[in-house]
Image (cartoon, rainbow, N blue to C red):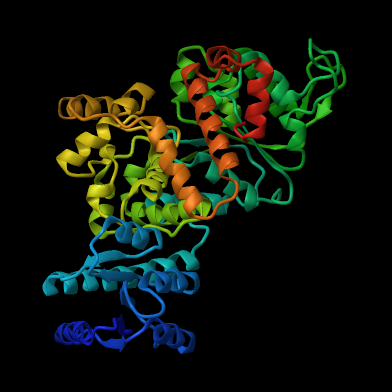
Amino acid sequence: MKPIWIVDDDQSIRFVLEKALMREDLPTRSFTSAKEVLSALDAANDDDGPQILVSDIRMPGTSGLDLLTRVKEKHPGLPVIIMTAFSDLDSAVSAFQGGAFEYLPKPFDLPKAIELIRRAVEESQREEVAEERMADAPEMLGQAPAMQDVFRAIGRLSQSNVTVMITGESGSGKELVARALHKHSPRANGPFVAINTAAIPKDLLESELFGHERGAFTGAQTMRRGRFEQAEGGTLFLDEIGDMPFDLQTRLLRVLSDGHFYRVGGHNAVKANVRVIAATHQDLEQRVKEGVFREDLFHRLNVIRLRLPALRERREDIPMLARHFLQQSALQLGVEPKRISDAALARLTTFDFPGNVRQLENICHWLTVMAPAQLVEPKDLPPEVGGGSPEALARRTASVPGPFAAPTGVAAAQAGIPGAAEAASAAEPAAASVPAMTWESALEAEAMQLLASGHHDVWEQLTRRFESRLILTALQNTRGRRIEAAQKLGIGRNTITRKIQELGLE
């Protein structure tokens, strides 16, 4: 095992920690200044470098916080514990903002200090193993048997152009599977075009799919190629096919049958050299029985059916996915990645995730912004997964989430998140007397973090995220009807269409 490096200008502190760690069979190496540590780090290789670094905050010359900053620049994965006799809020905040593993005030209880150091060592070793696994299998979506069945199916279909129907609950990753099918197919060099048929109003969907000729309808100033033409030579992914209007199902069936279609207002047939992959979270057999989905189209699409398991059916994948999403979220925000404890992972693993992988990803985004320490503990998890003490749970449930946090508690129930209503009603009595945090406060906190991280496009980042969340919420409220969503938002139809394109919400 690599040694624990201790840096403190106080000899007595170094001596006490060295002896205590020696009794725990933990090797150490001590330094009296940050300058010595930085020189040793430059000279060290992977084998004799530190497992973790324990540093005082107040030292002659370079301070512990400056040392933390310089260490994180070159060794971002190295856990650093900051010690200080100045137990003030500014020091704690500065340590955590700099990426410290934990903050240890002096005078400290020696058994607790050793326990903290051992926890940092275990976390460091676990992260090393996790990074190796992720490096070995960067494209893996999961290691559970249910996902291995999916991978095998993708492998068998890799050299085929057959139509595939992907079924699975919302948020389970159907588009990721569709992209994998495209990537490993003979059409990999062609385009991959995706369209959510439930998110586009009925009167616009036909033009979106098949395009239109100039003058086909009011506002059609030029000829426009539809998604079928855009996907020429590649793959067209039709998401939520179960919500496609009945009359458009007939046109889609014709394309799948003879490989030709007509643009809206057009008279010349256009050949479609496209592989179609469809997806739905609905029971299409039941939709056929109800008379809202064509049986002949169902059989045409259902050549190969690929069922994607819900996240609760592959719980062993949750730790790997959580670490991956925390890394991705930190990369997007330009901050130090949060680590997650075994206890917090165990709590996540027992949660049913009605929103599946997408919900886990949103929770990891929330933790990246809202978790107070670099190491995520069970108490730091959002209320919907049972995180926090009763007092913290009440405080968070009372909070009104803004556009930069995942909806929780009562707000989640009002937003229609499955399972949130019961949690909200159970938490309401405890939360009633706690003052709510406004979304403006959440915005202020988010802006402060971005500004402190050195970003120079904070206005652009927050404006895009605010507009995206507002438009998506309105579309959810109107079940994808853009015109109605625009009316409710108080903006024009052309404005919402332009914003959806600009923000990549298609």
Residue at x 40%, y 84% (from the top left corner):
37
Residue at x 42%, y 54% (from the top left corner):
326
In the picture, measured across the screen, residue 84 lies left or right of residue 96, that is: left
* Vertical comparison of 268 with 320: above or below: above
Which of 448 and 86 lies nearest the eye of the viewer? Answer: 86
* Vertical comparison of 323 with 463: above or below: below
In the picture, measured across the screen, residue 207 lies left or right of residue 194, that is: right
In the rendering, at what x and y percent does residue 194 appear? 63, 36
Task: Identify the residue at the far front of this view.
Answer: 60
Quadrant of the image for the N terminus? Answer: bottom left
Residue at x 39%, y 40% (from the top left corner):
359
Q: Do we see residue 261 in this rendering?
A: yes
Residue 24 lies in what quarter of the image?
A: bottom left
Q: Do we see residue 150 in this rendering?
A: no
* Vertical comparison of 397 with 344: above or below: above
* Vertical comparison of 212 with 32: above or below: above
In the picture, measured across the screen, residue 335 lies left or right of residue 187, that is: left
In the rendering, at what x and y percent does residue 290 appear? 46, 12
In the rendering, at what x and y percent does residue 162 appear? 64, 41
